[in-house]
Image (tube, helix red, strand yellow):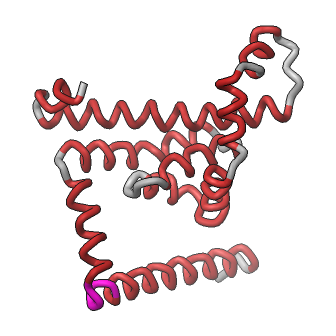
Amino acid sequence: MLDRLQALPTGWMILALTVIVFFRAQGTYWLGRLITGSAEHDFKNPLLQAFTHNRFFVAMSRWFNGPTPQKGAQALEKWGLIIIPLCFLTVGVQTAVNAGAGLLRMNWGKYTIAMLPGCLAWGTLYGLGFLALWISLLGTIAGSLWALLALIGLIVLIALYVMLQRRRRKAFAVDPQL
């Protein structure tokens, strides 16, 4: 499969990788919704009962109720929709956030719209080989004191900006004439 993808022209490879990650993320989201739904409802449909009581579903249910998807759900509750496309730029957080969105039973339309830029970014990063470069850059930052300090400074500036925006929204919500 990987050989076939690498044989494609770059644009087609990026499109194929974007579609692959789209369906993977959607599958994780829908499994989370199904597992949450099965916990909330006593399914009367015998087909659904058979599905939700098989070994695979029970094992998936254990994982979805474990710490990883719960952390993804917490990240969504804390940061909102912006965490969805950003999670595609990380390794390991993507599955947690997508599973968390399903567990929270997030609106499918909003979730899908939020994940599309992340899917495209992931497909592009993998298709052009930049993901390895991105991970290498993060490794370099971790090995250089000045680069690490610059990164921390950037993160602090972004956090301050987000906090100021939230305060402005709250102030506007309290007094719409501001």
Q: Which residues are magenta?
A: 144-148
Q: Nearer the viewer, residue 166 or 7?
A: 7
Q: Main secondary structure of the magenta part?
A: helix
Residue that extends furthest to the top in the rendered view of this protein: 46
- Compared with residue 60, is residue 153 higher up or lower down, i.e. above or below? below
Image spot of residue 2 (x, y percent): 22, 30
**Where is 6 relative to 47, above or below?**
below
**Residue at the image point whose x is 51% and y is 58% from the top:** 83
The answer to whether 162 appears left or right of 57 in the picture is left
- Snapshot quadrant of residue 34: top right
Q: Position of residue 14 (x, y in %)?
A: 23, 37
Q: Was residue 137 drawn as part of the magenta stretch in this picture?
A: no
Quadrant assignment for the N terminus:
top left
Q: Pick whichever, 22 or 126, lies toward us.
A: 126
Q: Quadrant of residue 52?
A: top right
Depicted 132 relative to depicted 147: above or below: above
For the point 33% across and 47% down, the residue is 122
| Relative horizontal placement of residue 31, taking residue 138 as reference (left or right) | right
